[in-house]
Every structure is written in C-alpha cells, then in structure tokens.
Image (spheres, grey):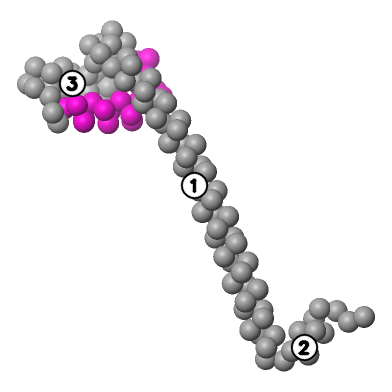
Amino acid sequence: MGSAFNTFRKLGPAAFVLKAIVFVIVADVLLLAFILLRRTYRKWYFAKRDARMLAIRQRWKALISGQIPYATWRKKTAERELIETMVLDAYEVANPEESARLLKQLGAES
C-alpha cells in the first residue's frame, strides 16, 4: 500500500497543479472563516454599542443639564466616547443657548 506522497510522485508535473489547487481551497476556507468571524464580532459589538447609546439617549437631558455628574461616566471609555460624539453631533444643530450648555458639558469633561 503506497502513501499519498507516492501518488503525487506518479502524477509528475500535475502534482504541482494539484498542490496549488489544494492550497487555494484551504486559503479560501480560511479567508471565509475570518470574514464570518469578523462579521459575527462586529454584529455583537454594534449591538452592544447601540444598547449603550439607547440607554444614554434615555437619560440625555439629565446628562446635559448636569443632574448626572460627569464623574459617574467619564471613566468608562466606551460610554464617554459615545457621549462626546452625541454632544458634538447635537452641537452642530444647536441654537446659541443650547450650544453654550453643550460646551459647558464638554468643558466639564476635561
């Protein structure tokens, strides 16, 4: 009973083509596995991020008015980045009175 390597030797130059085909198939499977893993992780990450964003939006007025002190959320990196992004987005469309309050909130963070 011969080994698989003996079978490859009998094929001659076709063995090189067969090895290349096997290599390409393995590479494609690994690439597909990476893509699926990455998509799964991103789905989980954005679902978690959206849940945090919803929780922040529900207490938005209390955050901006200062009823919830910035010290309670400033050490949480993910939450702080979301709040900073939301404040800057709100600042773009705010009237002068509200933009002053938003700037005060951003100033309290530093």
In the picture, measured across the screen, residue 74 lies left or right of residue 39, that is: left
In the picture, measured across the screen, residue 5 lies left or right of residue 84, that is: right
Q: Residue at x 92, y 80 (%)?
A: 1
Binning the other alpha carbons within 10 Å of mark 2 as few (below 14), some (14 to 19) or many (20 upward) gives few
Q: Which residue is mark 1?
A: 39
Q: Is residue 67 above or below residue 10?
A: above
Q: Residue at x 16, y 27 (%)?
A: 91
Between label 2 and label 1, give the one nearer the viewer.
1
Instruction: Give coordinates of residue 85: x percent, y percent.
Output: 27, 31
Binning the other alpha carbons within 10 Å of mark 1 as few (below 14), some (14 to 19) or many (20 upward) gives few
Binning the other alpha carbons within 10 Å of mark 3 as few (below 14), some (14 to 19) or many (20 upward) gives many
The front one of 104 and 20 is 20
Q: Distance from label 3 to label 2 (Cα)? A: 74 Å
Between label 3 and label 2, give the one nearer the viewer.
2
Q: Which residue is mark 3?
A: 102
Q: Distance from label 2 to label 1 (Cα)? A: 41 Å
Q: Which residue is mark 2?
A: 9
At label 1, the amino acid type is Arg
Q: Mark 3 falls on what kind of element? A: helix
> Where is the C terminus found, in terms of image quarters?
top left
Q: Which residues are magenta?
A: 71-91
Q: Are marks 3 and 2 in contact (CB under 8 Å)?
A: no
**Residue 78 seen by the camera:** no
Q: Which mark is residue 12?
A: none
Q: Of all residues shown, which one is farthest toward the top?
A: 67
State yes or no: residue 105 in magenta.
no
At label 2, the amino acid type is Arg
N-terminal-most mark, 1 or 3 = 1
Tell me which corner region of the image, top left, top right, bottom left or bottom right, holds residue 93: top left
Q: Mark 2 falls on what kind of element? A: helix
N-terminal-most mark, 3 or 2 = 2
Q: Is residue 93 above or below residue 27?
A: above
